[in-house]
């Protein structure tokens, strides 16, 4: 089970909520374990998930019928699944008997979809079957159309519906052991691809050829790539996309690589140079390493993103005074950036269920990326990024990641 049920129920009780309804791809996955494709591709083909404040109850998945095959194949842990969208058009056979468990599940979902023409009808059925007809309900507004919000208010006049995307972010801040395992798997796929990139990089190859190596390595174990910023020479000043530019002797190069696996994200970055680094490169890289390590010393339960940021900036500037950066990394999970989004200067929020400030104490088992990309126009730049799990008295690496300035002979 991916979702942190005890944390969810505690926040629901704190806010006097009868139920919460997830609508975005990430939050539906979180509550149900559903790994689908339809909602990613067809924005109008929504799925929802329902969790009530009953500690003995499981979750409900209200799923677009386009994902029936995926749920039949991959499954999930929803207690009840309501497929909707009307009956799919298949050619039937008299006395057809399913061949295996996958097709048995699919046939059940197929029949359910025929009983529930619309998302609203299926969601109303799920709420009523849970005896939720009054009280406060938190509805994730980010994946919910205004028409659905209004229709639910009309169907349940004794309920108060509140926008709840902030509530889901606060629940998801603390990762479960199951989530950490998937995050480790995603990070391992990325790290393996990075090592293959380092084995391939050399003078004369193009940035696009390097990117192809990363993409192939990510795809083979089932990873899906978000981005691969790879750039060399003067282009390494920041996260430019790869081009046909060929790497030359003396070039700095840097990359930032993001993917998702089973809907969970991995993000990392590193850098290097073609040939022996100059004294300037050695000095600047040494400063970045010092600041990076100094920021890690701050990480433990109760620290804030701003404290990590100040430690990074202070450590690097002591040897590299020109250095400046708007952040020192970010949170990561089902989304590449989760609350409090970035580790940087304080930002203010005015959203229901979210704290008023980004400067919140990071809890045990939150996952963050410490990051320091920096470059100088006309010269080049560096990147270092490392994923860690916040612990009571420190941190532990999500996976083993060796970060150094890679020298390509």
Image (tube, rainbow, N blue to C red):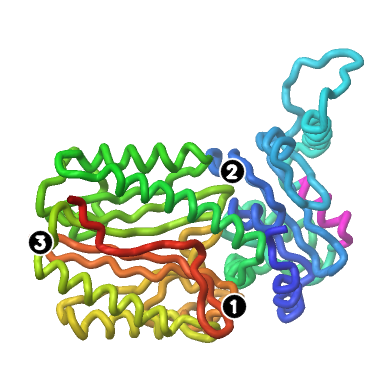
* Residue 406 vertical placement versus 95 (above, below): below
Disc 3 from disc 1: Cα separation: 40 Å
- Mark 3 lies on a secondary structure that is loop
- Judge whether 137 appears above or below 358 on screen: above
Q: Give the residue at mark 2.
A: 39
Q: Position of residue 200 (x, y in %)?
A: 28, 42
Give percent across and percent down for residue 284. 17, 72
The residue that appears at 48% across and 37% down in the rendered structure is 220
Say if the magenta span includes residue 196.
no
Q: Which residue is mark 3?
A: 379
Which of the two discs, 1 and 2, labels the residue nearer the N terminus?
Answer: 2
Q: N-terminal of the two: label 2 or label 3?
A: 2
Whole-angstrom CA distance, mark 2 to mark 3, is 43 Å
**Going by the image, does 344 lie left or right of 275?**
right
Kindly report which numbered mark, 2 or 3, lies closer to the viewer in this rendering: 3
> In the image, which residues are magenta?
121-131
List the residue tagged with mark 1: 364
Q: Residue at 21% of width from left, 82% of height from top?
A: 317
Up-down relation of residue 295 to residue 88 (above or below): below
Whether residue 185 appears in this view of the structure is yes
Check residue 129 for magenta coloring: yes
Q: Are marks 1 and 2 in contact (CB under 8 Å)?
A: no
In x, y percent, where is residue 153?
73, 60
Give how far apart the Cα atoms at labels 1 and 2 are: 32 Å
At 68% from the left and 59% from the top, the residue drawn is 2
Extreme-front residue of the structure: 409
* Overall secondary structure of the magenta section: helix
Res 321 quadrant in image:
bottom left
């Amino acid at each position: 089970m991916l979702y942190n049920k005890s944390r969810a129920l505690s926040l629901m009780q704190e806010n006097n909520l009868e139920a919460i309804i997830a609508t975005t791809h990430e939050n539906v996955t979180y509550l149900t374990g559903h790994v689908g494709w339809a909602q990613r591709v067809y924005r109008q083909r929504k799925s929802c998930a329902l969790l009530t404040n009953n500690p003995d109850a499981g979750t409900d998945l209200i799923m677009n019928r386009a994902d029936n095959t995926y749920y039949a194949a991959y499954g999930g842990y929803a207690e009840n699944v309501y497929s909707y969208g009307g009956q799919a058009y298949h050619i039937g056979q008299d006395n057809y008997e399913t061949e295996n468990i996958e097709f048995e599940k699919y046939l059940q979902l197929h029949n359910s979809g025929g009983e529930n023409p619309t998302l609203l009808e299926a969601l109303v059925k799920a709420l009523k079957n849970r005896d939720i007809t009054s009280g406060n309900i938190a509805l994730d507004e980010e994946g919910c159309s205004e028409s659905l919000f209004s229709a639910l208010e009309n169907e349940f006049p004794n309920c108060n519906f509140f926008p709840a995307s902030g509530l889901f972010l606060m629940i998801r801040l603390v990762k479960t052991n199951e989530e950490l395992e998937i995050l480790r798997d995603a990070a391992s796929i990325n790290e393996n691809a990075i090592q293959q990139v380092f084995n391939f990089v050399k003078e004369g190859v193009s940035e696009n050829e390097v990117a192809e190596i990363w993409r192939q390595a990510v795809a083979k174990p089932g990873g899906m790539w978000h981005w691969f910023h790879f750039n060399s020479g003067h282009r390494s000043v920041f996260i430019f996309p790869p081009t046909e530019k060929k790497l030359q002797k003396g070039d700095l190069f840097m990359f930032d690589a993001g993917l998702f696996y089973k809907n969970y994200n991995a993000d990392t970055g590193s850098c290097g140079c073609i040939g022996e680094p100059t004294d300037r490169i050695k000095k600047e890289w040494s400063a970045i390493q010092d600041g990076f390590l100094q920021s890690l010393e701050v990480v433990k339960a109760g620290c804030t993103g701003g404290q990590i940021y100040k430690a990074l900036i202070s450590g690097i500037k002591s040897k590299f005074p020109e250095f400046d950066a708007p952040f020192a990394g970010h949170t990561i999970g089902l989304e590449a950036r989760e609350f409090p989004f970035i580790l940087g200067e304080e930002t203010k929020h005015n959203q229901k269920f979210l704290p008023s400030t980004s400067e919140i104490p990071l809890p045990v088992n939150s996952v963050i990326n410490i990051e320091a990309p920096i470059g100088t126009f006309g010269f080049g730049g560096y990147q270092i990024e490392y994923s860690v799990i916040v612990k009571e008295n420190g941190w532990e690496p999500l996976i083993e990641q060796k970060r150094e300035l890679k020298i390509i002979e």
